[in-house]
Amino acid sequence: MKRHPMTELKFIGTDKYYYKSNKFITHFLNALSSTFPAGEQFFVRSVRRFRTSENTELEREITRFIRDEATHTIAHDIFNKYAETYGIPIYKMQKHIGILLKIVETYLTPKTCLAITVALEHYTAAMGKEMLRTDYWLSNMDDEYRKLWEMHSREEVDHRCVAWDVYDRNNGSFKVKKVVMIATSVILWSILSIITAKFMLNDKDMNLFDILTETYTGLYELLNSDYGFLHHMFKEIPLFFDERYHPSMS
């Protein structure tokens, strides 16, 4: 079987700060990458528990979803291991995320884990759409990293409906889904903030002045109302709480 191009990416010899205009954004993307391998394995397990033997379009979409997520896991695992060569403890963070998600699965029901997957897939689709909306973000990345984030973004957008449809097919509660989204959002952004801060503070190639200035300019770039990645991405989140909404609508 032909290997997916994402798993063929080679990061050896590439720059530590691959988002060229800002070091904070590089580390923010590193923080995201640290969550993907374990997170996407969690998504696969959550959806797979609700598979059926029926020959339906949704079942075929589940197969594609599992294939995509497995590819993303491999690609980000390769990158995360490489990032460690620059002294970025990204692979260690990846392992901690894996342990956390195993604990989640131990104490929560399969349907609640599926609801968590629905919430996080809404985020990854929103991130993917914003990454692809303009050339601003991808054009600021070195080539191999641009390929990684572009391919990942396209596939997240393509399979954005799968977990949602599986949850609906199994009569998932809308109220539970809303509560899970709120809790998941708090936990997700707390984790990303902590990991990004850790990467910045542990970066031996930056002094305190660099950390402060790169953080300020990076946050402005991410949050400003004109082209801010997070500013536009967050516009997608309120849609989740509209009972009439379906991911295919955006």
Image: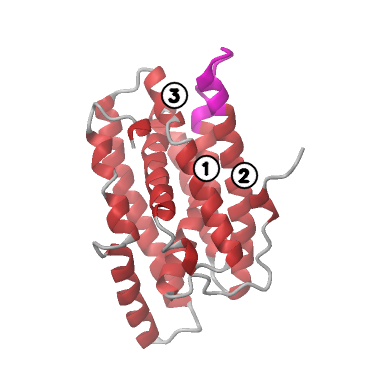
Tell me which amino acid carries mark 3: Val
Q: Which residue is drawn at 54% across and 27% down?
A: 62
Badge nearest the viewer, 1 or 2: 1
What residue appears at the point 23 percent right and 35 percent down from the top-left corner?
A: 241
Would you say 210 lies left or right of 226 here? right
| Stretch in magenta | 46-62
The answer to which quarter of the image holds residue 59 is top right
The residue under the point 33% across, 82% down is: 213
Mark 3 vs 1: CB contact within 8 A = no
Q: Earlier in the sequence, mark 1 or mark 2?
A: 2
Q: Nearer the viewer, residue 191 or 117?
A: 117
Q: Are marks 1 and 2 in contact (CB under 8 Å)?
A: yes
Distance CA(mark 3)–CA(mark 1): 18 Å
Give percent across and percent down for residue 235. Answer: 26, 48
Across and down, in percent, residue 89 comes to: 54, 67
User: What residue did someone put label 2 on?
Assistant: 71
Nearest to viewer (mark 3 / mark 1): 1
Rounded to the nearest angstrom, the CA distance separating label 2 from label 3 is 21 Å
Is tag 3's residue or tag 1's residue first in the polypeptide sequence?
1
On whether residue 199 falls in the magenta region, the answer is no
Residue behind mark 3: 166
Identity of the amino acid at label 2? Answer: Thr
Task: First in sequence, mark 2 or 3: give its number.
Answer: 2
Say the numbered circle drawn on residue 99. none
Q: Is residue 46 left or right of residue 133?
A: right
**Where is mark 1, residue-wise?**
155
Q: Residue type at mark 1: give it.
A: Glu
Q: SS at mark 2? A: helix
Residue sticking out furthest to the top: 54
